Image: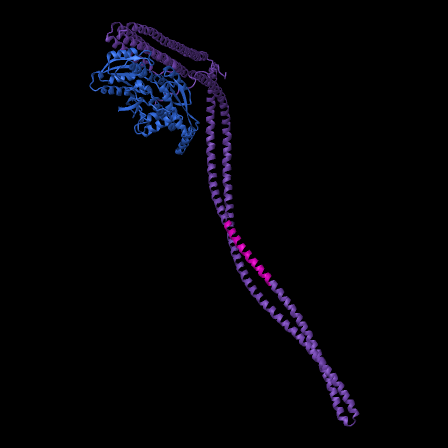
Chain colours: A blue, B purple
Amino acid sequence: MKQKSLTLALLLFTGCQRGADTYTVGAAGPWKESYGIMTRRGIDLAVEEINHAGGIRGAPLRLLARDDGADPRRAAVIAQDFVRDNHVLAVIGHVNSGAMLAAARVYDGELTAVATSASSPDLTGISPWVFRVIPSDSLNGAGLGRFASQIGGTDPSMKEAAVLYENDSYGRGLADAFRRNFRGTIISFDPIDQNPAAVEPFISYFKARRPGIIFVASREQAALAILREAKRQQLDAVFLGGDGWQSIVTDSAASEGAYVGASFNAGDPSPAVKRFVSAFTKRYASTPDAFAALGYDATMLVARAISKKGADRRGIRDYLSSLDSEHSFEGLGGALYFSEGGDPLGTGFRVARVSHGALLTGAAQ
Amino acid sequence: MIRLPAIPANSIRRTLALGFALLVALLVAAGLFGWATISGMSRDVSDRFAHAYELTRQSSTFSHTITEEVQAASAYLADGEPKSEAKFRKLGWEAHRIHRSFSTRRIELANEVTHSVAVDSKLAEVENAYALAHRLSDLGRRDEAEVQAQKAGDLVGQLLDELRRVDSSNNLAFASAAATLRENALRRSALLVAVIAGALLLAVVIVVRTSNAIGRPLRLLLKHAMQLSRGNLQMRTRTSGLPTEFRTLGEAMNHASDSLSRIVTGAVYTADDVARSAGDLASASRQVAESAGQIADAVGDVSHGAESQVHQIRNANSALDGIRTRASEMVAGAEEVHALAGAIEAEADAKRLEMARALKILLEVRDIVQQAAAEVSGLTTTAAEINTFVVSVSRIAEQTNLLALNASIEAARAGPAGRGFAVVAVEVGKLAEQTQAAADDVVRLTEAVTTRVTTTSRAMENGAVSVLEIERVGRELDGALTTIVAAAERTRQAAATVSASAEQNLQAVEGAARNLDMVTRTAEGQATAAMQVSASTEEQSAACEEMTSASSSLLLGSKQLRGLVGELRTAAA
């Protein structure tokens, strides 16, 4: 009898859940920035693929995308809107560390957020409701620091590094991780704006001090400004950047020879990556980068959680935290599951070198 | 388990206990409420103050760190000491760390984030500006460095504005929190005052009620006691509505009054009764004395009557003896009847058997007669046949005679030849005449026989009828005999019953005789007793005289008692 009523209750429960006509997820990021566009493409491709295959439990997946412009203040407001909208079951994003840090405190206890490229170490453990598909910058920065320590062999000039960082959560986190892991002298450690008005003094300074290695913890805009100025002043140094540098390849002249620590490599021979790259290229006529791959992975992961738990905000969070090495989600970067602090385990960074407008995979971390 | 003594309802003790329990409960509630209010408020206040303190502390540390950081940045511009730059960088790192630590707490509204983020990004701008100024300074481009430093200084001003904005926002929050706290405190203290006021009001009510509950009954009971002391036994206190303790006391006093009243009334009545009884007793004693004489006479009569009673009883006894003898005889007679009935029955049975046998013989006789009658009838038929035969003979004789005549004529005609013949003819004629005569004789005889036979036949029929009659009588006789047998049987049974009854009668008579014997003896005893009574009555008469004198003195005493009791006022007075 009890068994029977339990079965009935389950039937009713699942019946009710099946009753949802659409499943809505939020997405937030700087959609006008180039990395934002790539992230959004990855997300949109995933949504299209899911709905093309019949949706989740027969209902289409709807995307409610909001532009936070990488601004933490906007991100917090958008997060509050998402929390208040009962239709939103989970959030894909935010894309930036600063935005995610600000929004995390709004999502806490209410709504699951799966950040894509927000890699600040400060995000680790910020809330049980916040996950990310990109490893922490401390991992990337540490990897790049160790890589930079070895790159020049015994050349004494290669034992000196200068660091520039965007003065925000992302830049500070990545730069700090690099500094801790670089076995050499850091001759300067300077903050810069996201869109620096003047990088010339820094390059001039580097030209005077001649450090062998220059690590720039920035995104595309600052990276290109610095690389172009260095090229202009004919600065002879090895440039390294984090995942924020992945799109610098668009300026093949300036970016030639730079090292980039990336979580995704379009040249990966795994069938999943091949299929993704082929679909992406077909859809957008461009090669996907890590931002696109992270957006795609985050969307697929959230869709999986909804298909398992239905329209249940807490159920989705519980599902994500229940993943482990044996029950993992197969993402493009490998088997994906989360640490206590919401950081991805099972995936890693690879250092790639820019060569003629393409990223060539270097040593695995 | 502790068994509490039962406290009756509406007792002062109960009222007091209840009232005080309620009072204590109310006070405890007020205390608890007050305690909860104060501790809740103090917790609230301490939470809010701890938060405010922490915020202020962090804010001031933050401001302080920023100030030092800016100073270090300026210092580096002035002296170019790497130490100053290291300090600048270290303090900058520290400032961001502090900012992060107080911005990771859980917040509700986006605008709080907004302020906090604005401070952080403004600080970043300041740092960036100084970093650029430092590198310019390092490159020896003093003017440009100066311009950047100036720019950084402006940004510091903006940063301080942002900080002030955060502070004022915090202050606003504190002010509103303080207002809420004050409101809470006011509301709770008002509630507390209300509860305490309620408790005081209750206390007053309890005191007034208790003093009323004690004072009023006390006054009533005092009045009652005064009345009692004045000898007024009719005073009663109304106990309904009084507290249990006073009700008990009032009831006890009422009981006392009742009991006293009853005793006094009883004493008055008793004295009256005693006086009356004494008078009655005196007159009664006199009457008794007179009666005693009469009784003595009467007892003499009784004694005489008893003797004659004995005599009569003896007569009755002898009469009973006669009855007993006759009853014995009746028993014997009944037994004889019984025997006789048995003999009759046996005899009737035997006769019945004989009768049956006679009937049987009779039936045989009837059959024989009927056979004989049949034979006789056959004879009649034979006589008829004889007659027919005789008629034939007679006709032959006539013809023979005619023939003889014809032969004589013929012989006459034949002359002397026919003389012989004429003689024969005459002879034949004569024979014919003789035959005729014989035939006539036969007819006559036959007729005689026929007549006789007819007579016999009739006699026979009559005989048969008689036999039938006899048979019928025989059967009736048989029925009668059967009835007799049955009657004899019944008689025998009746005789047996009579015999049993007679036996019982006899026993009854004997019992009566025995009883009569006892009665006789009793009557004799009575006669003796009557004589003794006669003697006692005389003695009683003497005692009555003594009683008369005693009752007179009793009468006197009771009158004196009546006088004494009459002085108390009672219902009987």
Asked if residue B51 can be seen in this view, the reply is no
Residue B102 position, x and y percent, is 32, 13
> Of B345 and A61, which appears nearest the observer?
A61
B375 on left or right of B544: right
In the rendered view, would you say B272 is above or below B126?
below
In the rendered view, would you say B265 is above or below B504?
above
> Of B344 and A329, which appears nearest the observer?
A329
**Quadrant of the image for the C terminus of chain A?**
top left
Residue B75 position, x and y percent, is 26, 6
> Of B312 and B241, which appears nearest the observer?
B241
**Quadrant of the image for the N terminus of chain A?**
top left
Residue B345 position, x and y percent, is 53, 58
In the rendered view, would you say A8 is above or below B17?
below
The rendered magenta stretch, by its main secondary structure, is classed as helix
Residue B257 figure quarter: top left
Residue B322 position, x and y percent, is 51, 48
**Image: magenta residue range:** B474-502
Query: In the current view of this chain or complex, which residue is farthest to the bottom?
Result: B416
* Residue B480 is a magenta residue: yes
